[in-house]
Amino acid sequence: MNTFNAYFAKELPRINGALDAVDLPGPVRPIARHILQAGGKRLRPLLTVLVARLCGYAANDIYRLAVTMEMLHAATLLHDDVLDSATHRRGEPAAHTLFDMSSVILAGDALLAQANAQIAAFGDTRLSLCFSEATSHTAAGEILEIAAKGKAETSATEYETIVRGKTAWLIRASCELGALRAKADAAHTEAAAGYGENLGMAFQVVDDALDCAPQSVTGKPSGGDVREGKMTLPLRLYRASLDKTEQAVFDKNFTDGLMTEDDVQAIVERLRNAGYDMQARDAANAYLEAAQAALRRLPDKPEREVLSTLCAYVSNREK
Amino acid sequence: MNTFNAYFAKELPRINGALDAVDLPGPVRPIARHILQAGGKRLRPLLTVLVARLCGYAANDIYRLAVTMEMLHAATLLHDDVLDSATHRRGEPAAHTLFDMSSVILAGDALLAQANAQIAAFGDTRLSLCFSEATSHTAAGEILEIAAKGKAETSATEYETIVRGKTAWLIRASCELGALRAKADAAHTEAAAGYGENLGMAFQVVDDALDCAPQSVTGKPSGGDVREGKMTLPLRLYRASLDKTEQAVFDKNFTDGLMTEDDVQAIVERLRNAGYDMQARDAANAYLEAAQAALRRLPDKPEREVLSTLCAYVSNREK
């Protein structure tokens, strides 16, 4: 982790500097600042910078490009918080509890527009296309997730499509953007995108596994997904293990949102005892192996080591 | 109006054809179709086509560019309907009454993303910048309008800034986009943008005047703006005419949203009798004169005549 931490410590202030310099319409500023300054790991812009450097790009305008990924991510979070009626985000009150809901939706729109403008200023429409596709796929993934809510028979393929859309595509695009800016050849650009997509898949599957971990480990209440009717991989494995009668009860409560807190805790405990969260982590590791394989098709430079370390970080994440 | 109607009849099927061909993620399609097929005047794409032709652009890819303006408009309407909790739009049930609110917000995002992608495919980043600025200004204008809601002392300048943002900028961008695609010189591009901006200002000010017209004329309940706490130009003129005591009562009810239906109807009737709606129409006509002046700086071709007729249409609009 040391290579990664050193790299992160060096790049974080530059990424935050580029975020501070983002030009937004006056009335949008306080809302955008609220979501952007509440923290976050800046994983997405960091990936853009890492991949660009790995592909030989030296100029410092990469930060202005990289932060468009954080802006898209922030816009998504603003809209999500409204959708989910979440009360907190990144440990701070959710934007729509401080500002009115309408302004929060519009601030998300303005952030997307400014990110698009900032990308267009680079004069390379491949970058704009990459950004637009990421926005489009992310929205589509979230809509599919909403449509699948409470649907106990959500298939493995549906779950993968949702995860690829709502989480993996933006991480893929963050990597692809760096390669495109560096004018990497098609093979390297594809490898960078493949690394990002698999890292993103793993990231979300681990997140879904962590949702079943005890609160004493993660610091977050466990079972959020079952409570919200999200049929994640560990939950699907759990459901498949039930006998017919148990499954009928589970399905009814899952679909109708009738789980009590005791039901939820009993489910995650049984799920953990059977090791379904660990099976999900195995699935995540398979994605991470694919990410590592894609990495090996990229130049052997220090940034590749950092990107490889990131796979280990996602694999071992405990909260 | 005949030139205009003939032009409209010719271009409308082509514009609708390009809208039908828009590629959207599966789950977004029904929501996007709902808002796009509910009608609308297609004024914005028509302006893009007209200006491009006027500036000498002959190719038919202009329709694919032009509809991005309708897509942005539709995305705005989808988000607005959620914001306003409107039950109807263009005579049809509002999207969020048929689909869930979350999906409607996300469908707006996906429409914006696809419009950006469609523009990026033209390979000219000036077009992307123009589109992003339009999105950004529209969102900023709407946020300002929300912030000014119920504020009786909203100034003339604030009102203008709101109208320029929420309505005029998108109409300006529709014209500018046509000129940019035609590779018009800077003077012609600026003239086209100026025409659009002034036409857009006039369009909204007339709309605000029509809000005070009797329902028997417009077919819509009058006084919507005073009911919703929007301090439009005719309302500001009305308020300025009140004596101190009357004004204090008006301000309190306006700010607190305490108007009864009788109050509202009494206000719009007094406002009409004093001719403040007509004064607003005079202000709109001043914008239309500026639009006509900008037009005269563009080539003298049949499309210019159509654009000029459009000014008369906006000026004489009765519903």
Image: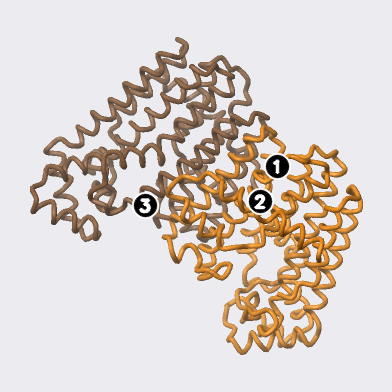
Chain colours: A brown, B orange
Q: Is residue A225 left or right of residue A182?
A: left
Q: CA distance from mark 3 to mark 2?
A: 35 Å
Q: Residues within 10 Å of mark 3 (few under 14, many from 20)?
A: some
Q: Residues within 10 Å of mark 1 (few under 14, many from 20)?
A: few
From the top left corner, tell me how far across and down residue B270 is, in percent.
Answer: 74, 87
The residue mark sitting in front, 3 or 2, is 2
Which residue is drawn at the image coordinates 70% and 79% (left, top)?
B212
Decide if residue A26 is in sight here. Answer: no
| Mark closer to the chain start, 1 or 2 | 2
The residue mark sitting in front, 3 or 1, is 1
The N terminus of chain A lies in quadrant: top left
Which residue is drawn at the image coordinates 57% and 51% (left, top)?
A107
Instruction: Label 1: state its secondary structure.
Output: loop
Which amino acid type is shown beneath numbered disc 2?
Answer: Arg
Of residues A253 and B14, the one drawn nearer to the viewer in this rendering: B14
Chain identifier of the residue bearing label 1 in the image: B
Q: Which mark is residue B14?
A: 2
Q: Which mark is residue A65?
A: none
The C terminus of chain A lies in quadrant: top left
Chain identifier of the residue bearing label 3 in the image: A
Q: Which residue is mark 1?
A: B60
Q: Is residue B63 left or right of residue B157?
A: left
Above or below residue A20? Residue B70 is: below
Residues indicated by labels 1 and 2 sit on the same polypeptide chain: yes
Q: Which residue is mark 3?
A: A146
Instruction: Label 2: state its secondary structure.
Output: helix
From the top left corner, tell me how far across and down residue A199 is, in percent.
Answer: 38, 28
Of residues A182 and B243, the one drawn nearer to the viewer in this rendering: A182
Which amino acid type is shown beneath numbered disc 3?
Answer: Ile
